[in-house]
Amino acid sequence: MLWNYLTTALRSFHQHKQNFILNVLGLSVGLAAAIIVALFAQNELSYDNQQPDAERVYRILTDYGVLKLPLFNLTQAEKTLKSTMVEDIFSIEMLEYSNKKTAAVKYKGQGFTLRSFYGATPNIEDFIKIKVITGNLKIALSTPDSLALSQSEALRIFGSLDIIGKTLLHEHGQYTIRAVFEDLPENTHFEFKSLAHVENDPTNIDDNFCYIYVKLTAQSDPQAYAKMLSAQSFTGDNKNAPLLELIPLRDLHFTAKSVAEFKKGGDKYTVMICFSLSALLTFVVSFNFINMSVAQSTKRAKEVGVRKALGASRYQLVVQFLSESLLISAFATAIACTLIELCLPNINQLIGRELIIDYSVHFEMLIVGFAALVGILSGLYPAFYISSFSSKQLLSGEFEQNFSASLVRKALLILQAAIAISLIITAVIMNQQLVHLQSLPLGYETKQRLVISELPAKLVHTKDTTILVNKLNAIEGVQQVTHLGFDITKSSINQINATWPNGQKAESAINVTGTGFNIVEGLELTLLAGRDFSSKFSSDWNTQVYEPFKRNIGAIVTESVARQAGYQNVEDIVGKTIKDTNPQYATDMRVVGVVADITIGNGESSDKSFIFLCGYPSANLFETILTIAPQKYPSIKKQIIKILGEHANIFEPKISLLADDYKALFVENKRVADLVAIFTYLTIFLTCLGIFGLASFSTLRRQKEVAMRKVLGASRFSIVNILAHEFLLLIVISVAVAFPVTYWLLGDWLANFNERIEQSIELYIFAALTIAAVTWLTVATIAFKAASSKPSLILRDE
């Protein structure tokens, strides 16, 4: 019996080659897209699942919301370590960014910078799955001046993994290599390549900020522990104290968005979009399959009628049609896997991941199951539909006139066209919004600006010009050197609660950063009132009095700060003093200038309030910004590397163009827009396949009508329009479905942006006309061939 079903299916494929090819082609494209999305989603959802007891591990996050400050993923170590005696805690682990240690090292006279260099506690293997290749990781992290290197870092520096006992020299001594471990997998939020013993000074509790992870017992309540930890860590009135939260380890890939993350995390929104687009594409190919099968069933009506007359049961007919559907799905799956192998390198480059197909038994079972599900669901309706008719209806021609089949085909085509129209509009809107964000006025200049990241403050952030700054200024092509206490393309991490000159307190925290002299000129800020910081005015630079502690400093504020302070005429705030009344760091900020508002990061925040403070110690590491002649960038970069190695003992510095750093902010948005565009092209292609198949069927049914019209003098063009009229009417209905739904969904998405474009009716009309034109051309290719046939060949049997 099974062999009979197979033979009949292959015979049917041979007799209806066009439908078979269109079905296989459509299903293979849809299945390939669905499998790739499944691989991407699996990768995103697998982050940190491999870690020991991952479900019981949490990272401590400090919430400064009550102080109107942002979340911060680093926590004060000594205060938190008090909780280690609590019965809820099973274990605690710390990772500390090693800016207290020297990352610049030398081996055989050649300079290197240790990458992703962190201090860690010896129990790190209780929290992170690390495979040690050689040496002893616990000893390395228990012994001062010892190092553990990743496999790639060991090969980069030493060219070998046999390095236990070898040393790296630095300006204060040397490190001894005591362990080498495998590189961390891509699906973890951790990222370190060099590890050393973590060193905390218990007497300096305000400086020991670390990534702190806790492993709770199975019976503990994370929320109760977080509440207790907050009460222990912060003294005084708890209503005005920060709170500590516990973030599950397996959620960090999606939820960790602080500027101090190990690496950029994922986005649930992107995963949801991919799932939605994949589902839409699967629906489209399934609709095509159903439409083709229902259309083809009219050609096979007599075959089925004869089978029924000879005693075939409805069950046997359903099994026959489902076996054909499953066989088509099997062919499509094999082609889909081939397409995936060919496209995966480009897909990985687009989404920034390293997806691979693991042909394990588990994966193969999933693929087979998914293909079978699509085949069954797509073939179920046609199978039950055609088998429901009696042999009399099938043999008399009554089946071909059935209205319900025509209605189903039209409904599915309407949905296909509506999806295609929606995706065209979505792709264009996303691209326009991305272009809009990138073209927003920033308030500072990105062109001709070179950035040297993370230079120690003592080398650049000084009142008197340092030797290093003089050397940088002397490079041919360098026009200006200044520095900033944070990366302006990211979020600010320093904020204060200001008191305005009139005595009123600011409603929200104000962003601040330390800078050097000439910051207005260095960033080409738009000066609205006052002047730039200048070495000619010694009072601009930060001066401190220690008993009691007080800081006097020059300030340049943005226009928004002046407005918040109550000055509609921004010139009036120049010379006034803004105060930070923090009892530990009281600061008087004398305003010397006002600049136009600037955009921090990618513009997601609507807050334009910012204060530049001359000489303010806002960070241990500063960004040095050079105004350069663009054509000399390669030679300038080469000289900077040489100068930093010779005069600052800094090797392999982070050097970039400010314009490139700003463009990098929109990489994720561009990925989403590109994914939508790809799925849009695929949907239009598959819609064309569906229209092509239905147009072929419709034209075949109406070929005698076409022949008669030609005999009566109708032109080819008029015949094409008559045949296309039915499909264009369906497109009009699909427009009525697509427009309101798309407008609502895109409006909701655009509402997430402070700066956004408006949806235009012209775009909606363009999308509708595009699908209408594609539909007409697709139908025309079939109709023109029919209209070109000789009427005598069609009507000779009448």
Image: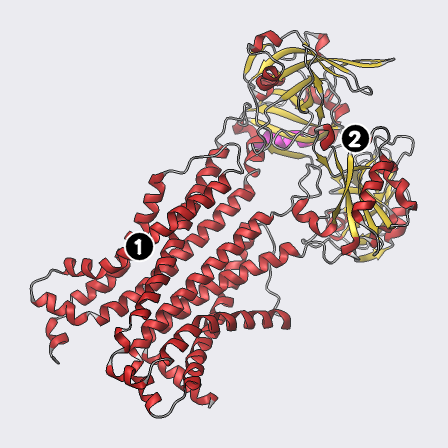
Circle 1 — which element? Answer: helix
Q: Which of 143 and 190 is in front in this view?
A: 190
Q: Which residue is drawn at 41% across and 77% down?
A: 384
Quadrant housing residue 641: top right
* Magenta-drawn segment: 634-641
- Read off the residue under disc 2: 239
Query: What is the chief secondary structure element of the magenta stretch?
Result: helix
Give neighbour class at mark 1: few <14, some 14-19, many 20+ (Cα, 10 Å): many
- Read off the residue under disc 1: 731
* Residue 163 in sight from this viewpoint: no
Q: Is 545 included in the stretch rendered in magenta?
A: no
Quadrant housing residue 501: top right
Instruction: In the rendered structure, find residue 466 and report the number of the disc placed on it.
Output: none
Q: Is 108 situated above or below 179?
A: above
Lower position in the chain sequence, tag 1 or tag 2: 2
Place of residue 597 in the rendered image (x, y in percent of width and height, measured from the top left): 56, 21
